[in-house]
Amino acid sequence: MDKLKFWDFGVIDFIDVFLVAILLYYIYKLVKGTVAVNIFIGIIIVYAIWKLTDLLNMFMLHNIFDGFMKVGIIALIVVFQPEIRKFLLMVGSTNLAGKRKFFSKLKFLKTENNTETDISAIIGACEKMSSTKTGALIVLERNNNLDFLINTGDEMNITVTQPIIESIFFKNSPLHDGAIIISNNTVKATRVILPVSNEQNIPQRFGLRHRAAIGICEKTDALALVVSEETGQISYIANGEFVMFKDTTELLELVAKDLT
């Protein structure tokens, strides 16, 4: 009688488990903090029931769930369209030859803070622009490369400082219209046109800047900071949703955490 060789674990098995872990990690990052995580849990429950009914020879119930599983792939594509798009964009934007190596994206393997962005300068600029009700839209690049947006604006290569950001969004500046993209403490582009979210649940008090910020965070893993020109309120958006904070100190901590 053959016995289970539990310790018969080769290199291929290790690679298999490692790749599955990476896949699950990215799926978790994509659905974390969104309603999609509840749908994902529901799918796992349905799959478990499907397997359980098969194991217990519950033919009628198993056939019902079996039919659901066969057509479920189409439903998954429809329901998870934004997450699938973001995942494919994440994979497609991986540049092995560039300065951002593939394994630099595997943040759970890091042991130190790798962000180079001067977050305090960005938050300080937002705070100052808030006091003067100067409208601003700042996009912070993370894993997804945002170079595809640069052509919609003006390409730059400016080190991030508080005066630079304030001067860009100064009302009489020719660069103030549109968004700026920041990556690794560098302003990559100004006057960038962002995709606008079509989400119906966004309150009407939020204008085009907020919809554009939500739009880019829905389609990529970027972070966005918005200063309202009407109220001076600072908004922080991640994963396509508004993130609440008490003050700019907490905002700085949230952005620093999300960038690392």
Image (spheres, rainbow, N blue to C red):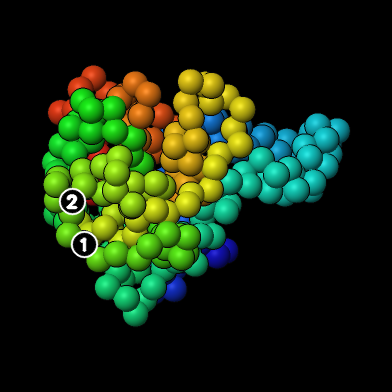
> Which of the pair 209/30 is nearer the observer?
209
| Residue under label 1 | 158
* Left or right: residue 88 compared with residue 32: right
Circles 1 and 2: CB distance less than 8 Å? yes
| Residue under label 2 | 164
Q: Which amino acid is tagged 1?
A: Ile
- Residue 20 appears in view: no
Q: Which amino acid is tagged 2?
A: Ile
- Residue 171 appears in view: yes
Q: Which callout, 1 or 2, points at the residue further toward the start of the chain? A: 1
Q: Residue at x 62, y 44 (%)?
A: 80
State how many labels appear: 2
> Which of the pair 166/65 is nearer the observer?
166
Secondary structure, mark 1, is strand
* Left or right: residue 14 compared with residue 1: left
Secondary structure, mark 2, is helix
| Crowding at mark 1 (Cα within 10 Å: few <14, some 14-19, many 20+) | some
Q: Residue furthest bottom?
A: 97
Q: Residue at x 21, y 62 (%)?
A: 158
- Rendering coords of residue 209 (x, y %): 44, 37
Dividing the picture into quarters, in which one does residue 32 lie?
A: top left
Q: Is residue 100 above or below residue 87?
A: below
- Rendering coords of residue 54 (x, y %): 74, 41
- Rendering coords of residue 220 (x, y %): 46, 51
* Left or right: residue 47 compared with residue 212: right
Dividing the picture into quarters, in which one does residue 98 lie?
A: bottom left
| Crowding at mark 2 (Cα within 10 Å: few <14, some 14-19, many 20+) | some
Q: Residue at x 78, y 40 (%)?
A: 68
Dividing the picture into quarters, in which one does residue 121 lie?
A: top left
Q: Is residue 151 above or below residue 21?
A: below
Between the C-alphas of marks 1 and 2, the distance is 8 Å
